[in-house]
Image: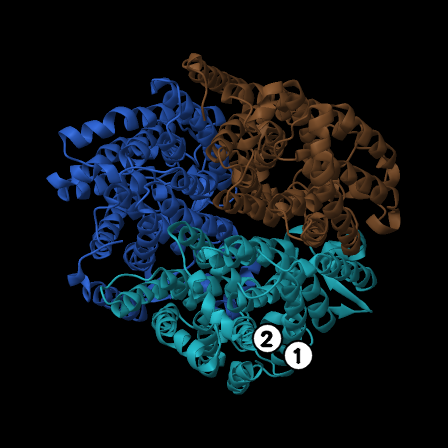
Chain colours: A brown, B cyan, C blue
Amino acid sequence: MAWNTNLRWRLPLTCLLLQGAMVILFGVFVRYDFQADAHWWTGRVRRNLSDQENEFYYRYPSFEDVHVMVFVGFGFLMTFLQRYGFSAVGFNFLLAAFGIQWALLMQGWFHSFQDSHILVGVENLINADFCVASVCVAFGAVLGKVSPIQLLIMTFFQVTLFAVNEFILLNLLQVKDAGGSMTIHTFGAYFGLTVTRILYRRNLEQSKERESSVYQSDLFAMIGTLFLWMYWPSFNSAISYHGDSQHRAAINTYCSLAACVLTSVATSSALHKKGKLDMVHIQNATLAGGVAVGTAAEMMLMPYGSLIVGFLCGIFSTLGFVYLTPFLESRLQIQDTCGINNLHGIPGIIGGIVGAVTAASASPEVYGEEGFEGELDPKNTGKVPDLWSLGDPGHGPDGRHHCGAYFEITILGTTFR
Amino acid sequence: MAWNTNLRWRLPLTCLLLQGAMVILFGVFVRYDFQADAHWWTGRVRRNLSDQENEFYYRYPSFEDVHVMVFVGFGFLMTFLQRYGFSAVGFNFLLAAFGIQWALLMQGWFHSFQDSHILVGVENLINADFCVASVCVAFGAVLGKVSPIQLLIMTFFQVTLFAVNEFILLNLLQVKDAGGSMTIHTFGAYFGLTVTRILYRRNLEQSKERESSVYQSDLFAMIGTLFLWMYWPSFNSAISYHGDSQHRAAINTYCSLAACVLTSVATSSALHKKGKLDMVHIQNATLAGGVAVGTAAEMMLMPYGSLIVGFLCGIFSTLGFVYLTPFLESRLQIQDTCGINNLHGIPGIIGGIVGAVTAASASPEVYGEEGFEGELDPKNTGKVPDLWSLGDPGHGPDGRHHCGAYFEITILGTTFR
Amino acid sequence: MAWNTNLRWRLPLTCLLLQGAMVILFGVFVRYDFQADAHWWTGRVRRNLSDQENEFYYRYPSFEDVHVMVFVGFGFLMTFLQRYGFSAVGFNFLLAAFGIQWALLMQGWFHSFQDSHILVGVENLINADFCVASVCVAFGAVLGKVSPIQLLIMTFFQVTLFAVNEFILLNLLQVKDAGGSMTIHTFGAYFGLTVTRILYRRNLEQSKERESSVYQSDLFAMIGTLFLWMYWPSFNSAISYHGDSQHRAAINTYCSLAACVLTSVATSSALHKKGKLDMVHIQNATLAGGVAVGTAAEMMLMPYGSLIVGFLCGIFSTLGFVYLTPFLESRLQIQDTCGINNLHGIPGIIGGIVGAVTAASASPEVYGEEGFEGELDPKNTGKVPDLWSLGDPGHGPDGRHHCGAYFEITILGTTFR
């Protein structure tokens, strides 16, 4: 965690200014969602919605799991480098703490703005964590190359762009992406790769010897890997519709991740001269199945469909670590420290395609005559899910409706770098 | 993680073949449970079951806790050996990822098979994790002696036998074992000890010096211990009946584990020449209370009953580490690397006995006139619990009904090695 | 973990005696709460309360999070010292396991005593964990200076005093303190500082070189920090009223903690000669926001109010580490190993003041005509919250009612050292 002495006052000032701005903006804009507001519940509407039906109980356990993924999962995943362990965890902590506040505002202006206030509930907290997850992904590409101030600035811009991108995809193009394959992972990966390309300096290559891991640091990284792997079903189901959608999203993610572990191990061993396993692959490629199943997790993908997705992603992701990362660095001067292109970039694109195919094969028989939108009935879910609240509520009962948009986004996702 | 070079292609091929078989079998057999299926919910039955009543919300938080126990808990518990830290976590990850898929199939054929399909919901995911926990227990006995391919083969056979054993105990003998003292822990321990006996080679004794721990590796192992300890109430309550049964199972496990810590510390210190604590005892024996209270956790064992169980298990388990493990190795040529006989074997048998005694002392006054079976009413729980679904629904209202079977199983559990 | 050989029999005997006493006292006094009792549910009252409404489902996920904070959070937070890593985790484990049992009894006699029995449910488990959290705080001041026997004795007395203090504040003075700023953190901190003052010996200063951290131990400590930080919203919302109160408590804590990270980093960097970050500040001061927002978390503090609290606490806490801790040690002979005065003492006092101000500015318009007490309606919450059960149920509909008491407690909190 070395930086120049001329940063003596820059970091304190940046932090205090950003945090001061947050206080003011929160004071002007942010209020509680009706489900967290004492006015509302003690008033007349209370009788219609019991405490049990409070969104809190549907989402809070998943929220805490996602929170663990962002702070412990991504933080420790990046400790595999011997000399950047504390930077990885500490800077990840700093950027995420700032990012969630700025994301609450940015996403709030786009999605939860009512009567000149942003109304914040547990779903906003989850979405803010999702947005920050995208920044953590990008951090993986620039680990060891940036100062905390640069990270805070990167976070500021990435969160802003994330919210705009999310608005375009989810609201204007009417895309469904509950697990964020495209909005979180693909966007985060290509944003990070763009930043690392810009930061490329010739002398970075000389620091090659710093890019090594030791036994202990690999065990710390496994803590990150496992918490990401275990809680990914919560990640993909956290903001799905209540009931069967959340249930299905968890099952699909569970299956996809399990399959991904076996094919990652197979590919890693097959590509090693002596058939050994590369720890970097075990730490990263095993997670690709969770990324790739994100978009389609809440759809009727079927357990075997999830296994196929995980099967393919374990292979592609490991191949990416072996062949693509060195290529990017030597030819395109993109030094991808943690291999985010292989873990988030490519699997995210696969996830978009899987979502498109699944949506295209959907039919009224599968999702019922009401289609997914039937679930928007506020009496049923207690709340119109955020992601859709600005969308056109009359886009018809057909699940196929969206399939056209999916292909656009896959391209769009890559366009946004 | 050293293995022979002739394994160059064996591991990749084994992984790919197993995973390919899983994809095909899932494609043929596995479908969503009605609570995770969009067809069902959007159809006519929807009005009768609200989103809130979806099994997902009763079970999902416990499921994630169990998931953490299997992957982080068992994985890191075994990192105490200086030279096998990464093997422990990595191989545990691999075998569990394969095991949960195969367990979903095996348990599904026995317990959730309807209209030529296995219907999978969150309870199946928990049961698959339980089954794999049994394999992780067995892995503790063979840590450092097996290749990943041998582990995958062991997992295949153990999961198969587990499902058969579980079917015999729960369905044919009508035994209740929600926390799996017998089905998971005793079975896993004696399966593992059998395997390690078979794998015994004379020259293994020469590798004695590898069986040492260092300061850092002991701290990593404490991560495993603590996550197992903290989440054990979820483990024992995860598939109990809704409401008071889950509530009671969590309280009983909490009490038993707390008592077990104090008596483990007492015994460990008393048996040390200088009164010091042995870290291996702190890492393992403190968990025995959770194992032993598994069967009876959801019964009216009473908090003081749980304390007594924990009290005794802490002592017995520590005594086992000090006297039994060396005896097994020197006389019976059973090298029990992690001491699973003391943590899972003996406490599991105690658990079976405790369950039998508790069930034997049950009466209609305690559980109500309907007995436990009153809870089977589908209107009440939303779903007939899996474990009982093939059982005889008319075996009378008396809680004592089962007590006879318990003793049989305790013996049976040990017969199954 | 070195202690004298004359302790050979003392520790085993102490543990066995304490645990034996617990078994007897539990046998005499502790029974299941009606929500965990099979008698009750299968009897006549069952029809009025569905399984879904069981307190278990409102509280259990938060309970597990709090459990993780107590055992992994506090345990690993104290591993930062190179030579006391295992002592920190192991002794914390021991004292907490004893403490939760004794707390169940002490708090039970004061709060859940009915018909000569203590009725235990999930809320009691959470409250016992809270009580032990206070002991863990105090342990932070004496880490490295006490034997496990001394710790057990300290735990015995602290839990006893905690329950008395809690009874005076919550029941006699009618104070609300759901997140325990005063009852848990301020009390724990000043109890611990008193003990460390008593234990002060001149030669302790010579052991200065043991008070150092190494790279690996700092990473282990970050595990503790992050699990405390991530699960703090559960800590502050765990025993709040159902519905909007729990929801609001989680949002407020989330916001306060996020703000606290940035100002801690700013202050840490500003106070370092070269602008570097001090890992101790990152590990500790970032948590102060959670402490300080505890009392007011479930009130209508507003998200910006939470940010202001976090903003200030990050600064004050870091200043405390830099200036106050050395002052206490050199002048007042209070050696505060982990700096608990800065993390729990001062932020706890701030928390009391924030609670008082928030309560003072409450009005019937904000909380509804029924005030907070409206929520006490048993039909609404399923159960009269424990904390209030012995209080005067008729203390009027005005939220302002309590404001007077708050100032008293803040002083009282500091009086209790």
Mark yes or no: residue B12 visible: yes
Q: Secondary structure at mark 1?
A: loop
Check whether the beta carbons of the residues at disc 1 and disc 2 lie within 8 A of each other: yes
Q: Chain of mark 1?
A: B
Q: Amino acid at mark 2?
A: Glu
Disc 1 crowd rating (10 Å Cα; few below 14, some 14-19, many 20+) is few
x, y percentage for residue A55? 60, 42
Mark yes or no: residue A114 visible: no
The Cα atoms of the two marked residues, 1 and 2, are separated by 8 Å
Eyeballing the image, is A185 above or below A246?
above
Q: Amino acid at mark 1?
A: Pro
Residue linked to disc 2: B373
Mark 2 or mark 1, which is nearer the start of the sequence? 2
Eyeballing the image, is A172 above or below C192?
above
- Are the numbered discs 1 and 2 placed on the same chain, yes or no? yes
Residue linked to disc 1: B393
x, y percentage for residue C167? 27, 48
> What number of labels is visible?
2
